[in-house]
Image: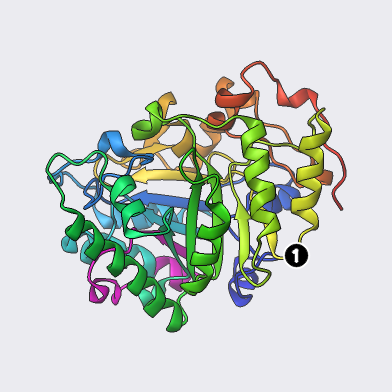
Amino acid sequence: MMYELKALPLSPANDPWESIDRRIQFGKNILTSVEFTVTNLCNLRCEHCAVGDVLTHKESDDRVPIEILIQRLEEIPYLDTLSITGGEPMYNKQMVEEYVVPLLQYAHRRGARTQINSNLTLDLERYEAILPYLDVLHISFNYLSAEDFYKIAYVHTHHAVSFAQAEKTYQRLVENTVTLAKRGVFVSAESLITVHTKDKIGAIHRKIKEMGCKRHEVHPLYPSDFARGMQVLSLVELREAYHQLLDQHEPDLWILFGTLPFYACSQNEEDLRLIRRMHATPNVTVRNDPDGHNRLNVNVFTGDVTVTDFGDTGPLGNVKSDSLQECFERWQKEPIFQKYNCFCPQSRCNGPNLLVANTYYKEVDFRNGKGISLS
């Protein structure tokens, strides 16, 4: 099946990171997606960074040999997608040469889709080595101006950054995006709905379209790492922001809603109205959470295997001694996961992730609900 997926272009009808399709096929969650953390370095310190607590100013010398990582991938029967993240994965040239490129090459040869999460603010030539093996260039974009970028991207820096520096970096981000999009690279821009962006989300959407991106991925802000102290929006505020964005949707720009805090088993008619609208709007999709449902993260420095959005539960194993399949099966049996391990195929819903549930639904056992039909 993964070769059939590879033969089709990425589109709302073909999102290989989506976790529910394999669950429908096999009747259970299976491991089809692996994400590698390849650096803890980054040239930015964004206010919303989900890995801010582990960012450093010096790279660790301890690394799992690339041969072990490839061997662990070889043991997975179905590898639909491989993602690279950090920090800024392209920041350390040595890591790009010794880990990023070989991992992307392996996945590409195997027929899996590939993605790298980058802030895209480095010199354009830095990205040339990965483009032949890359399906999705995923960037973060929450700005309408260099002033917005300056306020958001340097909140947690340990040294002063001038506005002139920030403006230059922002312009490079925009120019890199435009240039790569014109070259046919599938650039997917992610925006977070926060207290700062909720009233600008439609304008940000248009800016992303103007830059040539193929997809706009939209998530609410959740309180993790650097974002722990940020104001979390209410469900009412989020509903309003989602409707605003749908009202201003550029029809030929794919919107992908992720970690959506609204479910088809809701007893709130306003929730159901929004969900029906999302599913009925052309070129709009709602992605089920991959983490723990079909994806694991591997840290190439420690070898630890984790479920990214459930990081507080600790490692499930280590690639030096454990197969990824063993780690995935351990997670499926974790008591903390069971409360959210529900499945409504008629709603195309594979249940929430822990960040969403802990933020808005602490007392809800999702296994007791039944979602409406959205077919």
Would residue 27 be found to the left or right of residue 98 on screen? Answer: right
Residue occupying image coordinates x 73% and y 36%: 263
User: Badge 1 is on which residue?
Assistant: 282
Would residue 159 be found to the left or right of residue 319 on screen? Answer: left
Q: Position of residue 298 (x, y in %)?
A: 37, 45
Is 11 situated above or below 323? below
Q: Position of residue 80 (x, y in %)?
A: 55, 60
Q: Position of residue 35 (x, y in %)?
A: 42, 51
Q: Is residue 91 visible?
A: yes
**For residue 324, which quarter of the picture?**
top left
Amino acid, disc 1: Pro
Residue bounds of the magenta highlight: 106-130
**For residue 342, which quarter of the picture?**
top right
Is 363 situated above or below 66? above
Q: Position of residue 344 (x, y in %)?
A: 79, 39
Residue occupying image coordinates x 29% and y 57%: 89
Residue occupying image coordinates x 23% and y 57%: 166
